[in-house]
Amino acid sequence: MMIRKLFFLISAIASMALPFVASFTPSTKPLASIKIPPDDGPNDISSSRRKWLHNTVSNLAILGSVPMIFPCSAGATVVTGASSGLLPDLPPDAVKSYLQYRFPLQLAADFYIFDLQTMVADTDEYGTITDLVASKNARGGQGQPSKIERDFTNPMRIMSLSMPPEYADDIRDSQFAFERAMSKLTKATSGIRRGLSVEIDKDVVPAAKAAWEEGRVALNSFFVTLNTATGLENELAVIPPAGPNQFQEYGRSIRRYNEFMKKTKLCQNRGGPALSQAWGQLMVSGYLQDSCGVEPLEGYFFQ
């Protein structure tokens, strides 16, 4: 009985493998047509099942020699590097800056669409939005940049300084437009915080959403300029306007984003407050290690 169960198991594996080998082995008898010999008697079992086992193993051996080909989408992302697109034609500093900041820039765009967009629609989150934009000043004039400065405006500034003039001016325009949008967002959300008893004007949420939209347009223009300068069409994914199909049009996974941010936060908390300030720089520099199970930035970027 145990032998018969083994035959059923091997047959099932062989049948599942059939679609991968059918096109490579036209003369091979279909695996699904192989029949398990019945238990007719003790004299027939050994020879008939030995023959059946030999045929099945032979077919599986063919499968092992054929590379596994899995279907992929027509828009499968190609991993790019310093020799891709027009990068070899750009100044070395521009190439270095782009390769350093493209991963965190796309992550910042993911935050903008998946998190910040939701926050601007919820007045309970306005205190958090204010904290995202406000710099954390320290003694002696040495302060910590805000998340918006660290993840958005500082990379824009660095890219504008390293790119050729024909692209640098457009990047600067995008940076200034984004900064104006964030200033409007701060103005719309300031003074409103969860637990604070204040009267909220009916125009506050529409104003915050309008500022978010203005920032989306500016960020997209920055990404389009970089994609043009590098010759890597659509490598940096722009954010579609708000709508029922927005996430689908964006083409990046909110599930992977949430998982990435969750594991990153857990890993950050292990370091305690002493290391939390340096975490943003580790993210930008690409030194985020997978010791906490965090997906590597390169794998996360090329979705």
Image (cartoon, rainbow, N blue to C red):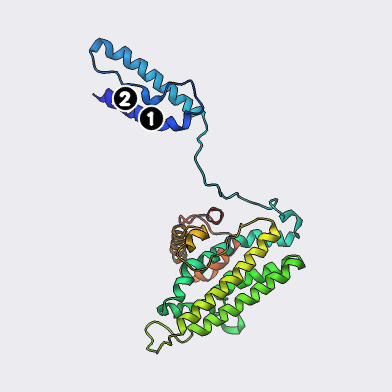
SS at circle 2: helix
Q: Position of residue 33 (x, y in %)?
A: 37, 23
Instruction: Name the residue type under label 2.
Output: Phe
Would residue 100 appear left or right of 53 to someone viewing this image? right
Q: Residue furthest front?
A: 244
Q: Would you name the residue on which mark 1 appears?
A: 15
Q: Position of residue 263 (x, y in %)?
A: 44, 60
Residue 13, picture quadrant: top left
Is residue 187 in view from this perspective?
yes
Is residue 137 in view from this perspective?
no
Closer to the camera in the image, 268 or 224: 224
Q: Residue at x 52, y 64 (%)?
A: 110
Q: Residue furthest top?
A: 43
Q: Residue at x 70, y 61 (%)?
A: 229
Instruction: Name the residue type under label 1.
Output: Ser
Would residue 138 appear left or right of 228 to someone viewing this image? left
Q: Are marks 2 and 1 in contact (CB under 8 Å)?
A: no
Please determine whether, in this image, residue 177 is positioned above or below residue 95: below
Residue 7 shows which numbered tag?
A: 2
Find the distance from the CA under tag 2 to the CA under tag 1.
12 Å
Q: Residue at x 51, y 29 (%)?
A: 66
Query: Are there few (<14), some (14-19), or many (20+) residues within 10 Å of tag 2?
Result: some
Residue 220 shows which numbered tag?
A: none
Q: Earlier in the sequence, mark 2 or mark 1?
A: 2
